[in-house]
Image (cartoon, grey):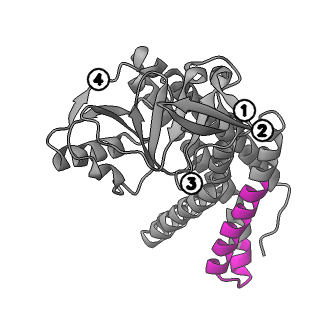
Amino acid sequence: MLIFNRNNIPIFILFVFLFLMTYTFQFYVNKQQMYEQLSNNLYTSNSSMLIAKGDLTWINEDLSRSQYRLFLEEDDTHRYLLKNNGHWSPPMISGDFLNLSERTKTAVIGREMEQYTRTISGVKYISYQTKSYEVIGIMGASFPSSVDYLILLHDPGLQLNDLNTKIVIDSDNPNVVKKILNRATKSDSFISTIDNFQKGFLRTGDAPFLYKFLLLEMYFLLLIGLISILRYGYEKEQKVIKTLYMLGISKKNLYFEILIKNSVIIFLSSLISLFIFSGAVIFDSLALSKVLLVMPITILMSWIIIGVFIGRDHLEKKRGVVKR
């Protein structure tokens, strides 16, 4: 039977550092995405703006299974959230974000817009076009941004019949935006796209390619690190496997124990790394959900990688290749 011993300590430590590196990178990516949206009036660099002059029934359809958002821009301050397929929300200072299933008129405002609210029976309201909206949340970051001057509205009885309705399609996935835009233009020949003057710091600095290249490079380095650690641990176990095999234990059982043993090491090292990292960083709910996915994905990838190692060794033995 394969047991934990002193040879596993270096592997455990390497996994702790690998997870710390992964968590740090994931935290950086989430912060960059937040800064991009804050500098772009809550839009990502993938957003596309169009003018709808005809039938707007396509807006009520499920345009994609992936996460996306539809906004109706009234002016530089006011906009309606028409669709929020997913769990997107801006950085919130207090309160809750808009729930489009609610049947009441609600609003989420930037902190600088609180001065335009009025309080009735302890509830804040803000007015727009003779209608009153209950303020259920204050959005903004820990530093001043353009979001402080925005008002997001939800009106379940909103009538989309303006001949020059400005619609913004947005998603974290640029292909989803293109798909929805193509679907909208095919359903309504009167739709025309316009340039979005809000670009955010990525497009303003003309750095989308460099940023994507940085992400790809980092993911590649993390993958190489995972493969290297697993290969090191796999080679360390070979002498024990050969000895146990000579004692009559099936190699299938031994290889399965390697997979289980590595999974336990990955699980424990990820928990310790998360404990160390969370002591220095405060996660928001979305960032934490992404971080928690790292451990099961790593275990799955480790099974695949070790399976490749085992298959490669099996083929070499069939071909008569002798390993020292």
**Mark 3, other Cα within 10 Å: few <14 / some 14–19 / many ≥20:** few
The residue identified by callout 3 is 102
Magenta span: predominant SS is: helix
Could you tell which of marks 4 and 1 lies nearer the N-terminus? 1
The residue identified by callout 2 is 122
Residue 108: image tag: none
Q: Quadrant of residue 252?
A: bottom right
Could you tell which of marks 1 and 3 lies nearer the N-terminus? 3
- Give the amino acid at mark 2: Gly
- Please name which of the two marks, 4 or 1, marks the residue nearer to the observer: 1
Q: Secondary structure at mark 3?
A: loop
Q: Residue at x 84, y 37 (%)?
A: 279
**Mark 1, other Cα within 10 Å: few <14 / some 14–19 / many ≥20:** few
The residue identified by callout 4 is 195
- Please name which of the two marks, 4 or 2, marks the residue nearer to the observer: 2
Q: Which quadrant is home to the N terminus?
A: bottom right
Q: Position of residue 27 (x, y in %)?
A: 65, 35
Q: Position of residue 5 (x, y in %)?
A: 85, 60
Q: Secondary structure at mark 1?
A: strand
Is 259 in the magenta?
A: yes
- With 18 as the anchor, is 211 left or right in this view? left
- Give the amino acid at mark 4: Asp
- With 283 as the anchor, is 127 left or right in this view? left
Q: Residue at x 29, y 41 (%)?
A: 161
Whether label 1 touches label 2, CB < 8 Å: yes
Could you tell which of marks 4 and 3 lies nearer the N-terminus? 3
Q: Which quadrant is home to the C terminus?
A: bottom right
**Rendered view: 51 above or below 87:** above
As measured in the structure, the alpha-carbon distance from the residue carrying label 1 to the one carrying label 3 is 21 Å
The residue identified by callout 1 is 119
